[in-house]
Image (tube, helix red, strand yellow):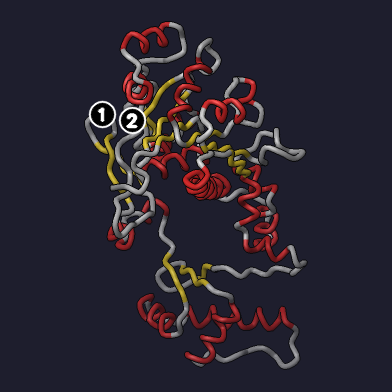
Amino acid sequence: MRPLDGLRVLDLSRIVAGPFAGRMLADLGADVVKLEPPEGDTTRFWGEVRHGLSGFYTQQNAGKRNVCVDLKAPGATHLVLRLARRADVLIENFRPGVLDRLGLGWAAVSAANPRLVMLSVTGFGQTGPLARRTAFAPVIHAESGLLARQAAFDDAWPSDPMLSIADYNAALHGLVAVLAALRMRDTTGAGQHVDLAMLDAMLATDDYAHHALDGFPVRRLGGEVWDAPGGPLMIAGEFRFVWRQLSTVHGVADPTPAGADLDTKIRCRREAAAAWIRSFADRAALVEALEAAGIAWGDVPAAEDAFDRPQPQARGVVAEVDDRGGGVRRVVQSPYRFSAAESGVRGGAPHRGEHNAEVLADWLGAGADEVAALASSGVLLAGERG
C-alpha cells in the first residue's frame, strides 16, 4: 500500500510550486491528473528535451496522468467541474481572479463538490495590496529579504540563489496544508480552500529573518566553506562553538591581543582556525580531527556529481523512469521512507492529452463518443505528443 492510495487530485498548476506538490502526492499514492492547456506547461521546454519531454517537466510531473483542456473553449468549464466533483484535491497556481473569470474559482468548485480541498499557491496570497502581482521565485527571494541579507553577508551586489527556494518551500507547505485539510474533512465532512502565499511560506521558514522581529543584528550563523587539503570543505555550526572545540580538544592557541574588540577577536580566531585547517597533510587526517572534536563537516561536490556519491546511492535517491522513447530517464525520488508503506515515483511524465479517454472513463464513466465530441468541439486536445 501507499499512504494516499485512492486519493484523486486534479492538478491545474504549472511550472514548479503546484506541480511539485502534485508530484509528491503522486509518489505517495494519489491518482494525480494534470489538466494542461493546449500550449503546454512552460517547463516542457526547460532543459534537455527527449522524445517530446524535457527533463525539468519530467521531474515535476512523473507519475501523473494528463488531460489536455482548453479552458477558454465553450463547454470546458462544465467538464472541469465534472472532474472536480470526483476529486478530493484541486491544485492551482493562477493569479487571484483568473479561475473566477473562468467559472472555476473556489465558490464554483466547492458548490460542485463540498468535500473538495483546493490548494491555491500564489506569490503573495489571495488578499493584500500585492495579491494580483505576478510573482516567480526570484521575486519572492527579493521581497522576503533573502537577497539583501545574503549580499550584506558577502559584501556583494544582490543576486538570486541558484535554486527556486520559494517554489519548493511553498510546495511543501502546501502539501502539509492539504493533508491537514483532508484530515479535518475526515472529521467534518467538508473540504476547504487553502490560500498559500510563497512570501508567507518564505518568511515562516527563514530563521535569520526571525531574528529581525527582535531587532537583533544577525551575524553569519550557518555553514561556511573553508580552504582545506583536497579542496573546499564545509564546516557547519556557529563559529563560537567551532572555536571552542578547536581550542579545547586540539589546543589551538588564541592569537587575539589583550583588550581587543569583538570584531578583532573574531578575525584573529578565524585566521587561527584557517591556519589549523591548512596545516593538515591530507583531507583524511583533517576529517578525523574534526570528527574527534564533534564538528560537522561536508564535502563540496559539483551538482552533477552529488547524486552519484555513496550516500545518495545507498538511499536510492535517484530512480529511472520510462523516457517515452524506449529508454529510461533519471529523476529524483521523493524523500519519504515509510516503515509500513511504499512511496516513490510510479512512472514517466505524460504527454499532453495522453490520458484524455482513460481519465474521463475512470473518473466520469465517459465513453469514446463523448470523448470524441469533446475533442471535435475544441475542449480536449487529443493525441498531441510533447
Please tell me whether residue 331 is drawn above or below residue 309 in the rendered image: above
Please tell me whether residue 131 is drawn above or below residue 101 in the rendered image: below
Task: Name which residue type carries label 2.
Answer: Arg
Reading the image, the residue beneath label 2 is: 50
Reading the image, the residue beneath label 1 is: 325
Q: Identify the disc placed on residue 230.
A: none
Location of residue 187 in the rendering, given as x and y in whole percent from the top left corner? 50, 47
At x 66% / y 34%, what residue is drawn?
Answer: 134
Element on which disc 1 rests: loop
Crowding at dot 2, Cα within 10 Å, few <14 / some 14-19 / many 20+, comes out as: few
Please tell me whether residue 84 is drawn above or below residue 191 in the rendered image: above
Q: Left or right: where does residue 30 sit relative to residue 232?
A: left
At x 38% / y 21%, what residue is drawn?
Answer: 364
Location of residue 79 in the rendering, given as x and y in whole percent from the top left corner? 47, 18
Location of residue 301 in the rendering, given as x and y in whole percent from the top left corner? 41, 59
Query: Can see residue 172?
Result: no
Count of numbered circles on the image: 2
Task: Name which residue type carries label 1.
Answer: Gly
- Front-lying residue, 107 or 227: 107
- Could you tell which of marks 1 and 2 lies nearer the N-terminus? 2
Q: Left or right: where does residue 187 sit relative to residue 376?
A: right
At x 60% / y 20%, what residue is drawn?
Answer: 102
- Front-lying residue, 60 or 176: 176
Element on which disc 2 rests: strand
Disc 1 to disc 2: CB gap under 8 Å: yes
Crowding at dot 1, Cα within 10 Å, few <14 / some 14-19 / many 20+, comes out as: few
At x 64% / y 48%, what residue is drawn?
Answer: 141
Query: Can see residue 315?
Result: yes
- Front-lying residue, 134 or 353: 353
Residue at the far left: name it: 326
Name the quadrant containing residue 272. Answer: bottom right
Please tell me whether residue 311 is drawn above or below residue 256 in the rendered image: above
